[in-house]
Amino acid sequence: SQKIEQNSEALNIQEGKTATLTCNYTNYSPAYLQWYRQDPGRGPVFLLLIRENEKEKRKERLKVTFDTTLKQSLFHITASQPADSATYLCALLYSSASKIIFGSGTRLSIRP
Amino acid sequence: GAVVSQHPSRVICKSGTSVKIECRSLDFQATTMFWYRQFPKQSLMLMATSNEGSKATYEQGVEKDKFLINHASLTLSTLTVTSAHPEDSSFYICSARGLAGGEPDTQYFGPGTRLTVL
C-alpha cells in the first residue's frame, strides 16, 4: 500500500530563515501532490497543489517542488515568521476524483 | 475561498448515547463530502466518502452501522456516532469538494468537532 513519510515530526528554526519540509512516498507517483497547514484543534487549510509534470510551484513565500524520480516533494517557507508555526501536511491525490492520502505531518515552530 | 462549517465544535456525551455532527458547505455545492478522524499527533484518517443522494462508501475497518452518514443535500452531510464509547473520542473533520472541472477540485475542510465520550 502507498506510504507517505514526512521525515521530521518536528522542526524548529529561527525567524527569518527558510524552513524546508520533506515529503517522501513509495510506489506510484500521484497525479497531484498537495500541502496543507493545520493549526491545533482546527481543520487543514489548503496551501498549494503541484502536478506530477510540474517541478516547482510558488505562492508568495511558499515554494513546493516535486521530484517523481526521487519520489519526493519539498515545501519551503522563506523569510519564516512565528505566525508560520503550525503542522504542515503533505497529501497525495491520484486522480481528480480520488481520495486524498495524508502524511503524518511536520510540526513547524518558528522562534523569534 | 469556500467555507465549510461544522457543528458542534465540541461535544461531551455519556457512553451509549448517539451524537450527530453536521457539516455544511456555506457558499458552494458539495457533490462529495468526506469524513475524517484524527487522533492526537496523528494524521487524518479517512472514514468515509459520501456523494449527494447516494450511500456513503466506508473505508476498511470503519463500521457503517456505528458511523451513520447522510448526505441529503448538496450543502449538508451529517455523521452520527451511534452508541458512542470512550474509544470513539477523537477529532472528527469533514471536508467538501465541489463540482468537478479540469483540475482536481480542492477539498475544503471544516474546523472539526472534538468528541469526548465519558
Image (cartoon, grey):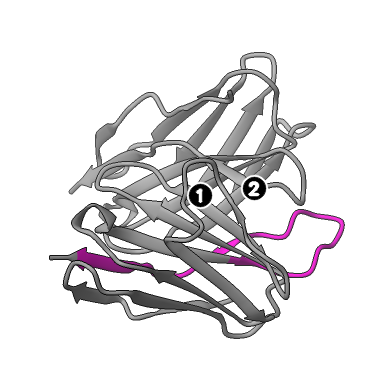
Disc 2, SS = loop
* Residue sticking out furthest to the top: A69
What stretch of residues is rendered in magenta? Answer: B96-116
Query: Which corner quadrant of the image does residue B52 belong to?
Result: bottom right
Determine which residue is flagged by label 1.
B46
- Compare residues B75 and B19 and report the one nearer the observer: B19
> What amino acid does circle 2 point to?
Lys
Q: Is residue A92 left or right of residue B84?
A: right
- Look at the image and tell me whether residue A80 can be seen: no
Chain holding disc 1 = B
Work out which quarter of the rendered image holds the C terminus of chain B and state it: bottom left
Q: Is residue B9 above or below residue A53?
A: below
Label 1 packing within 10 angstroms: few (<14), some (14-19), many (20+):
many
Return the chain for callout 2. A
Residue B10 appears at what percent x and percent y? 25, 75
Q: In the rendered image of this protein, does residue A94 appear above or below residue A39?
A: above
Cα separation, mark 2 vs mark 1, equals 8 Å
Give the x, y percent position of residue A76. 47, 37
At 30% from the left edge and 67% from the top edge, which residue is drawn?
B83
Residue A28 placement, left or right of A89: right
**Given contact means CB atoms under 8 Å apart, are the residues at marks 2 and 1 in contact?**
yes
Read off the residue under disc 2. A99
- What residue lies at 65% left-to-right and 18% top-to-bottom? A27
Where's residue B110, x and y in %?
Answer: 46, 70
Q: Which mark is residue A56?
A: none
Q: Is residue B95 shown to the viewer in this render?
A: yes
Q: Can you give x and y, in whole percent of width and height, for residue A10 in the image?
A: 26, 34
Q: Amino acid at mark 1?
A: Leu
